[in-house]
Image (spheres, rainbow, N blue to C red):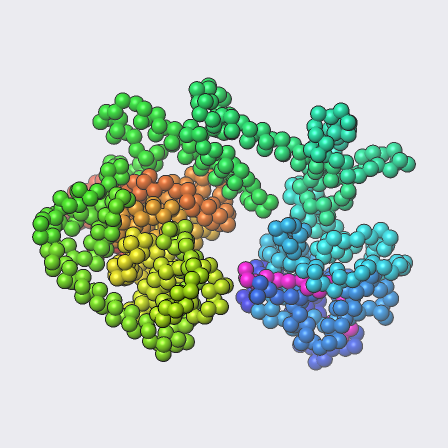
Amino acid sequence: MRMSENHRACDSDGSLSIISSDSMVEIQRTQSESSGSLSPSAEEESKYRLLYSKSRVYVNPTAYARDNIPGFVALVKREAVNPTYLLAWIPETLLCEKGTDEWDKFVRIEEKAMLDEEDEDAVLIDLPTQRPESYAFSVPLTSIYSLLVHPPTLSSWHGTIGINLINSSTLPTLHFHDDESFSMTLPSRYSKSSSTGAYPPASLPSSSRTSTSWGGEDLLSRLRPYAHLLRSTLQPSLFIVDPSKADIDTHTTQIFDDDAVDDILAQSSYASSHSPVPAHRRPRPLYSVPANTSNQHPTRPSVLHRSLYPPSISTTQSSSHARMALLQSFSNITRATRHAAQNILSHPLAKPIVPHLPDPVKSLVNANGDLEWGSWVEKGGVGEFESARVYLARWARIVAEEGDRARKREAQALPSSSDVVEEISPLGVFELLHSTINLPSPKTSRDPAHPIDEALWAKWFDKDGRPKIRLEEMKCQVFRRGITPYGNLRKKMWPFILGVHEWDITGSEREAKWEEKRKRYCEIKDEWCGVPEVFDRPDVLEERHRIDVDCRRTDRTQPLFSTSYEDTADNGSNGDRRYTTISPQMSDIGAQSPSNEHIDRLAGILLTYNFYNKELGYVQGMSDLCAPLYVVMGSDEELTFWCFVEVMNRMIQNFLRDQSGMKKQLSTLQELISVMDPDLYRHLEKTDALNLFFCFRWILIAFKREFPFDDVLRLWEVLWTDYYSNEFVIFVALAILESHRDMILRYLVEFDEILKYCNELSMTIELDSTLAQAEVLFLSFAQLVADIDRRRAEEATDSTSSVLRRRGTSPSEGKASLSKVAMPTLSDNLRDLLKTGR
């Protein structure tokens, strides 16, 4: 465990030191050098009095349930002139090492209804020796700043409490498994009568205790006698521990008066039988005011404050239900009104009046009659734990995209002219180069509206199959225009783009070379297919299982992979069926999504590649790259395999075991951002987002999961041309970031927010404008590099001539030569982005 020294508290005799870190707080005991052994009084003081314990409180180191660590949360008192109260979490493994006596102490304290008050009955414990992997912590209550409390909900079965320290570090989140806890499963939690005495201080009588709904609430009630817990009105799940005056002023602001909703309820007609609202829609009062009390509105926090907080911790649980029902009714009315407006205004007959509506009403309408905007609003609502800044960023992005679409529609409606077409661009407002570098703005050359078709492809070849144009010209046309999605033209062209088929040879020569590759594939496949001693080898079994699991969940929306095997009698009679099913065991088939012939053949191609490239083998993510090839090649195994080999030759660095290839590409993207957009780079640096983890999936599988399937095919054929750069995927990633830079800079100030925002861009990115931006970015980068090299060459020439003419140089000229604009330094990785051709 790496412990930081930013928070350390030691007592006078040096027997206790508390060291905090980003993950936990550890108690260490040191023995004074002057004393060889502890005296009886010192030994007594080394003990800690156990005031409260609760079992089955988990710490979750990972997202997997198997890694969860059970333990006890405890409130401990260290006896001294000024006693110290500690909040601790001890894993069960460490407690078991102390023996059954220590375990029984924790269980006995948990089962007690009230705390013992006699000193001789006090339970003294030794805090177990902590290990780095245990996640145990023990921290004084005075060093805790706040508690973040989330009770159980329908979406989260177990409540949690997060602990934030004064030094800004955070302890492991505690998960309360009340269904397993000893105390929460007892018939009566507080059945004993209360006793009077000076200890514990300010203890609540049992008659005043209410039954707790979950373990976290029980812990809060036990902490209140020893610390002041202030629940924030700004964030109801936040409790400030021993707040300062500034904290009290900040976190006790009422959002609106309590009487506001009470007056609405009192004056509303829901209780009247003459109410126009149907009976089943009226909010029912879930509480009644006692007749013997004159105060119909007891003391309580703000209505909005209480409505935002779960009723399990609310001090007036029953009285809040009516207000919640009213607020929910208002929400339902608002939602129903919005949906009704969408249905009416999105009807084709409403189109004539839409231009005359106010802008807020127009935002509910989509010109083509679809409820695209309204459905996004409903899907993109702020959840219970979703950051408001992420919501605002997404909202701003949708508004900007709607504005761009509107400008494009207006531009298309104008009379066409060469000048207008030159001004209209899918790039929108996009400025990259600094004003100090006076370079012309590059233009995109893409024309995806006129893709290559069968007729144009046929014109490029003679009768003998030899091409009339150079390979570079063919790739240029693919980059600019793309390939038509109709027919089987991609099946013909992709092998040429990837290099499976040679270009400048005749058709007969090409067919002979392909026959050699086809035979080579059969030879590699025969190494495992029909060979039980290889097929059932332990290492092959492991690879088969991984391949089978990935293939069963890859592109299942495609027609080839969407169906499953039918239960027919002849399936079992096929003798070769054993080797076409990649799943190691028949039991695995039932545990996964159903398979079919094409899924098995796809898995067979990947298993064959495992034997072809034995050093690399199969790595998760390869199925995402191979499945589109299989679809485009029309389930042709040999053609799919060799196209996949060429794709992996280009992307093999992405799948290295040490991830060195991915680290290099992300580092290159980071350097590119620093040169092309310094403001964005500084923002990412400030938010600890320079690792660019949100771009990892983009580059790993070439945006396979960021675009729809058809757009992925168009993107890949552009990337494979290597027309501008062998690493054009880096510029595509930069184009996406630049498209959303304003939202990132304005709204997203935390790494988690940027990560969430970028992950939610999946299936919302427009491909053509992104590729156009990527092309402009590359051309701008190439101009920038050329300008930097030219200026440095001029500086070198000037410095050489200044040496020869040193005597004739005036001081003003010397100062002018030094007032050059500082040019950025370009690394080898950045210069490699200008390389093309393989």
Please identify the quarter of the rendering in which residue 786 is found.
top left
Q: Residue furthest bottom?
A: 36
Q: Which residue is located at x 67 percent, y 59 percent? A: 176
On the picture, is 824 further left or further right than 805? right
Q: Quadrant of the N terminus?
A: bottom right
* Magenta stretch contains residue 678: no
Query: Can the viewer see residue 88?
Result: no
Q: Position of residue 829 (x, y in %)?
A: 29, 55
On the picture, is 75 further left or further right than 509? right
On screen, residue 123 above or below 157 = below
In the depicted view, which residue is nearer to us: 521 or 25? Answer: 521
Extent of the magenta region: 42-64
On screen, residue 160 above or below 763 = below
On the picture, is 68 further left or further right than 263? left
Q: Position of residue 620 (x, y in %)?
A: 40, 62
Q: Position of residue 82 (x, y in %)?
A: 77, 61
Query: Can the viewer see residue 123?
Result: yes
On the picture, is 821 further left or further right than 591? left
Q: Which residue is located at x 25 percent, y 24 percent? A: 416
Q: Position of residue 804 (x, y in %)?
A: 14, 48
